[in-house]
Amino acid sequence: GAEVASTAVITKLLRVFMLEPWIIAMYYLGIGQTKTTAKAGGTTAKAGKGVPWFAFGFIGVATYNSIFGIAPGLQKTFTMLSAGFLGSAMAALGLDTDLVKVKSLGWKPIVLAFALWANLLGMGLLVSRVLVGM
């Protein structure tokens, strides 16, 4: 019920919160980024995807909510906005998908993707039945 959903949300947010220092450290250490690029005048600059502002935003909002609290009305509004942003991000991923390129990879990656999807779906169902007893 509602208690299980609340526990699941808290667990998810705690995992994300524990990832934040690693995300920020990876950015500042340059892990996963192109090391340098040549610029005019012979200087070099760090090339990458940019500062992970979402990480700082998450920490800021979590800290603010822990210290001052966010009104329930605003929480409901932010929840709806969050769902809308998540839907937009997923749609953007779909817009970037080129089915011709996927088809050119052959059948093995498609079968692997389907197997991973089926595994995720099946294991999610199994875990929910075991933990929740549905």
Image (tube, helix red, strand yellow):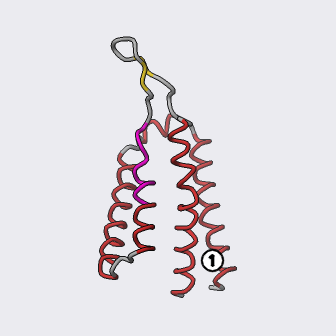
Looking at the image, the residue that sits furthest to the front is: 67
Q: Which of the 4 quarters of the picture holds residue 61?
A: bottom left
Q: Is residue 50 rendered magenta in the image?
A: yes
Front-lying residue, 132 or 70? 70
Q: Is residue 35 above or below residue 43?
A: below
Which of the image's four quarters has the C terminus?
bottom right
User: For the residue carrying disc 1, how many other residues have a C-alpha within 10 Å: few (<14), some (14-19), or many (20+)?
Assistant: few
Which x, y percent locates residue 106?
56, 37
Q: In the displayed structure, does residue 66 sit left or right of residue 114?
A: left
Q: What's drawn in magenta, residue-wise?
A: 49-58
Q: Is residue 6 above or below residue 104?
A: below
Q: Determine the residue positioned at 34% across, 61% down.
A: 85
Q: Which of the 4 quarters of the picture holds residue 59?
A: bottom left
Front-lying residue, 45 or 11? 45
Which of the image's four quarters has the N terminus?
bottom right
- Prevailing secondary structure of the magenta residues: helix
Q: Determine the residue positioned at 58% across, 63% down.
A: 15
Front-lying residue, 22 or 32? 22
Q: Is residue 103 rendered magenta in the image?
A: no
Which x, y percent locates residue 80?
32, 72
Residue at which label 1 appears? 128
**Three-letter amino acid code at the position of disc 1:** Ser
